[in-house]
Amino acid sequence: MQNEANTRYKVWAYINLVVIPYYLQIKKQAMKKYLIFFTLFILISCGHKLDSEVEKEVSYISKYETCILADFVFQTPSYLNLMTVASNDDLIYLTNDENPVVRYFAFIGLMERNYPKINQIYESHKNDTEVISTSNGACLKNSVSVNSLMKDAISKESIYTLYFSKNKYYRKKRTLKSATNSHS
C-alpha cells in the first residue's frame, strides 16, 4: 500500500512538475503564433487604402523624383499634385512609405496643413536615415537623410515656416483686399 501511494505521488509530481508545465509552454507558444497571425490579419485587412489618384501621384514621385529642391519642395509640381489629391489620412499613411521622397513630401504636406500631431510624426522618424538627393536648383547637389530634412523643416528658423507664414499672410491680405473691393 505504501509502495502504491509512493508511486501515485511520483506520478502526480511528475505530471504537475513536468507534463503540465510542458503542455502549458506548448500551448503558450501556439497561442503566440495564433495571436501574431491574428494581429497581422487585422493589420492587413484594416490598413489604409489609398485612392487611385493618390497611388498614381505616389507612383510618379517614386519613379521620377530622384533629386529634389529641398528648400522649394512646396513649388514642385509633383508635390503640388500630391497635395491636391491626398487627404490628411493619406499623408499620414504616406509618411511611412518605402520611398524617402514620398515620406518627406507627405511630412511637408502635413506641416503645410498645420497638422496638430506633426511633432509626433517627426519623433517617429528620428531614426529615418535613408538619404535623399537634393539640389539648390543650380549646380550644387547633396545627399541628406530624411530625418535631417524633417528636422530642418520643423525648426522655427526653417524656410518652410517662413514660407507658410508669408503665404498665409498674403492669402489673408488678398482675401481682405478682395472683400474690400467687393464692398466698394
Image (spheres, rainbow, N blue to C red):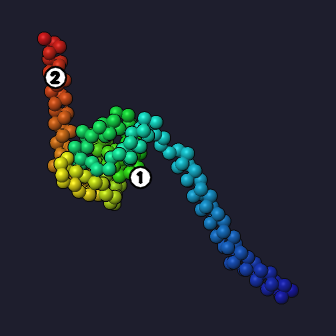
Q: Position of residue 67 (x, y in %)?
A: 28, 50
Kind of residue indicated by mark 2? Leu
**Which quadrant would the C terminus be assigned to in this image?**
top left
Residue furthest to the top in view is 184
Instruction: Check disc 1 and report its element: helix, strand or loop.
Output: loop
Q: Is residue 182 left or right of residue 49?
A: left
Identify the residue shown where x is 29% and y is 37%.
Answer: 77
Q: Which residue is mark 2?
A: 176
Determine the secondary structure under disc 2.
helix
Across and down, in percent, residue 97 comes to: 41, 49
| 52, above or below 4, in the image | above
Locate residue 157 relative to residue 52 in the image: left or right.
left
Q: Amino acid at mark 1?
A: Glu
Residue designated by label 1: 98
Mark 2 against mark 1, which lies toward the viewer? Answer: 1
Q: In the rendered view, tell whether residue 84 sits above or below residue 27.
A: above
Vertical side of 149 occupied by 77: above or below: above
Is 19 or 94 nearer to us in this picture?
94
Quarter of the image for the N terminus: give it: bottom right
Which residue does the image show at 24% across and 47% down from the upper left? Answer: 69
Dot 2 and dot 1 residues touching (CB under 8 Å): no
Res. 127 image quadrant: bottom left
Residue in the foreground of this view, choosing between 59 and 97: 59
Q: Residue at x 69, y 78 (%)?
A: 18
User: Can residue 100 be seen at all in this image of the molecule?
Assistant: yes
Residue 92 shows in this picture? no
Q: Position of residue 49 (x, y in %)?
A: 48, 41
> Marks 2/1: CA distance?
43 Å
Residue at left 14%, top 21%?
A: 177
Q: Looking at this rendering, what residue extends furthest in the bottom direction?
A: 3
Mark 2 surroundings: few (<14), some (14-19) or many (≥20) residues within 10 A: few
Q: Residues within 10 Å of mark 1 (few under 14, many from 20)?
A: few
